[in-house]
Image (spheres, grey):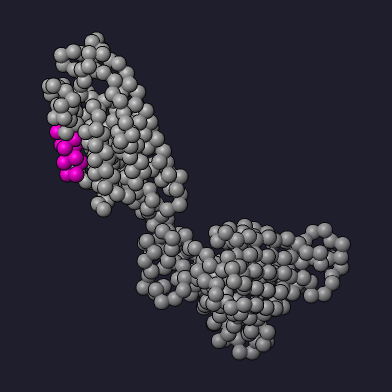
Amino acid sequence: MDTTPTLADPASDGTRWAGRRRFARVGRVLPVAFLQIVGTLLASRVLVGPGVGTGSAGPPWARHAFTGAVDPVHLGPLAIGFLVAGVVVLPWRWRWPRSVLLLTLATTIGYALVVSPRGPFVAALTMALANAWLRGHRWWVVASAGLAVVVLPTADAVLGRSSVLDLSAVLLCIAWATVTIAVSELVRVRLERVAERRRQRAEADRRRAADERVRIARELHDSVAHSMSLINLQAGVALHLGADLPDQTRDSLANIRDSSREALVELRTILGVLRSVDGAPDREGSERAPTAGLDRVADLVERARAAGVDVTLAVDGDRSAVHGITDRNAFRIVQESVTNVMKHAPGHRADVTISIGPDVVDLVVADRPSQPRVADVGSTEPLAPTGNGIIGMRERANAVDGTLSAGPTTDGGWRVAARLPVVGTDPEDAR
């Protein structure tokens, strides 16, 4: 089947086109069916012009040249069957435009051969001709229209239903075929222009998005990456020169150095992804994952413990079963929750629980005071983190059609619970 970029099949555009596809295949056929079937039935039973009842008959396009009258035409089951069959095949015009054109041409010619045609019996053929023209089958349209111009206005004279060939009927048939092709070509050109404008807008949007990614990457590099590099360098120098420092101080400096080094690796990888165009990886980022997943939760917990936070980790299930954007977002939710404990509740103990089922993964990060404090007893103000942390976690959960809840606990702590599907769809991968 020949397809053209000027008129895309709605079936190729995914589920968001489902309603439009049904309307295009069936809804637009209904007026054509009504016009062809009902209009032809009514036109076949109407007595037209002077001299009615003289027994004269005429072509479908005009009154008889001599009597000026057209007698009623009796439509038998075969004629009605041809009328109905012509419109029944139209819903499949998108998938098989040439086959539908040939079938409607055959039913239209068959109707003209069975009875003296009258009325809009060419409505289905008109739609099939226009569809095939828009789909790129122009020679098929020209050949079919030519055959219709030859057969339809001459059927009455050839089969003896009329004593003379009506020239006006021939001219009217030629005009019908010409107008159908001309209007179809105008529509085709219009669709091409609309499609071209859409492509230009999409390309402009893509360029703006790429420029914005480069700008963000540049800003991150000039500010965050520079600062992280200085932190890593100064922590390394302090470790090198501070041989007589207390062990706890050296452990803190080592943790700062290692954490900043890992953050730099992730940041540089993200910068490479941001700088890439259309998902093409940079030279350095092509060999490492853009972001961490649940396989890095253990390292995250160890760094939190090194920073002085009492963190426990419990994992139930196979972490390798979680992948894609769900894996990355799950890690970021746990990371943000643990970071909030470190920032907002340094004296609390955090429990990280990850339960991986066949369909969903449940994440729970709950903190509570290690020892009861006087300030916590009867306090109505929970140790709630501020800023955009919870908003970002909820956005990550919503991005994979998951859920997230966060709120204070009765013992003065804070609890974050998220439920995510095991397999998530990355919006970038779905394009």
In this rendering, would 156 be left or right of 227?
A: left
Residue 299 x, y percent position in the rendering: 59, 80
Seen as rendered, the residue at the extreme top is 50
The answer, for residue 339, to whether it is visible in the render is no
Asked if the magenta segment contains residue 141, the reply would be yes
The tally of labels here is 0
Q: Quadrant of residue 355?
A: bottom right
- The residue shown at (60%, 65%) is 420
Say which of 249 and 217 sits in front. 217
Q: Main secondary structure of the magenta part?
A: helix
Find residue 314 and report its horizontal and vertical position in percent: 67, 78
Closest to the observer, 281 or 361: 361
298 or 10, which is in the foreground? 10
Residue located 65% across and 64% down the image = 418
Q: Which residues are magenta?
A: 139-150
Task: Establish if 185 lies above or below 254.
Answer: above
Quadrant in the rendering for residue 380: bottom right
Residue 124 % position (x, y):
30, 36
Q: Is residue 78 magenta?
A: no
In this view of the protein, can residue 255 be seen by the observer? yes
Quadrant for the C terminus, please: bottom left
Q: Is residue 368 left or right of residue 403?
A: right
Q: Quadrant of residue 419?
A: bottom right
For image coordinates 78% across by 64% down, the residue present is 409
State the image coordinates of residue 208 (x, y, percent, origin top left).
39, 52
Say which residue appears at 21% left-offset and 33% top-offset: 113
